Amino acid sequence: MKKPKAYVVGDSHVKRLSKGIINHFVKEKNVFLKYFYGATTKRIKHHILPTLHDDEPESVVIHAGTNDIVDGNCVNIVRPLELSKNIIEIGKLCKDFGVKHIAISGILPRKDVESQKIIDEVNSSLDSYVKIN
């Protein structure tokens, strides 16, 4: 029987996580980090397809959205709620591939006030979605 796999997927912030520390707190000790430098939510959604298909993870933590916000503006996105929708779609894609446990990480805070307003709105929207699903 295969050991269950867990992945933390997202932008380059994921590379800063310590796999050793994560594995210390995880029973199966089978956590993998999958990060994509400079990737927006749409790129992450595209890039995780091979992982979902080939590795069949049981659990996925999604950390995405940072690279969709530049200098207080959403890049290639009409509004912050659309950014939230893109992050949620990554979770739905994971579910479609049979991932049993999905967690969505909020976007990390920034010092830039305009960017932080967008981050707060996106994180609030994600929080609301998670509470009802």
Image (cartoon, rainbow, N blue to C red):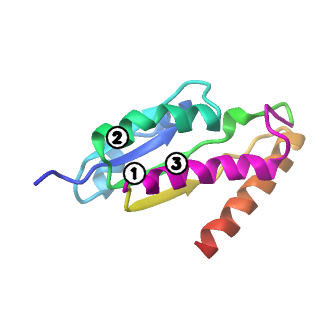
Q: Do the residues labelled 2 and 3 touch (CB within 8 Å)?
A: no
Depth check: 132 or 35 in front?
132
Amino acid beneath label 3: Ile
Which label belongs to residue 53? Answer: 2
Which label belongs to residue 62? Answer: 3
Q: Nearer the viewer, mark 1 or mark 3?
A: 1
Q: Which segment is the magenta one? A: 73-98
Going 44% across and 37% down the picture, which residue do you hit? Answer: 49
Disc 1 crowd rating (10 Å Cα; few below 14, some 14-19, many 20+) is some
Q: Spatial distance from mark 2 to mark 3, Cα to Cα?
A: 16 Å
Snapshot quadrant of residue 120: bottom right
Residue 11: x and y, percent?
A: 56, 33
Q: Which of marks 1 and 3 is nearer the N terminus?
A: 3
Depth check: 52 or 30 in front?
52
Total marks in image: 3
Snapshot quadrant of residue 67: top right
- In this figure, which residue is indicated by the disc labeled 1? 97
Looking at the picture, does residue 36 appear above or below residue 84?
above
Majority secondary structure of the magenta segment? helix
63 displayed left or right of 75: left
Looking at the picture, does residue 28 appear above or below residue 11?
below
Going 80% across and 56% down the picture, which residue do you hit? Answer: 121
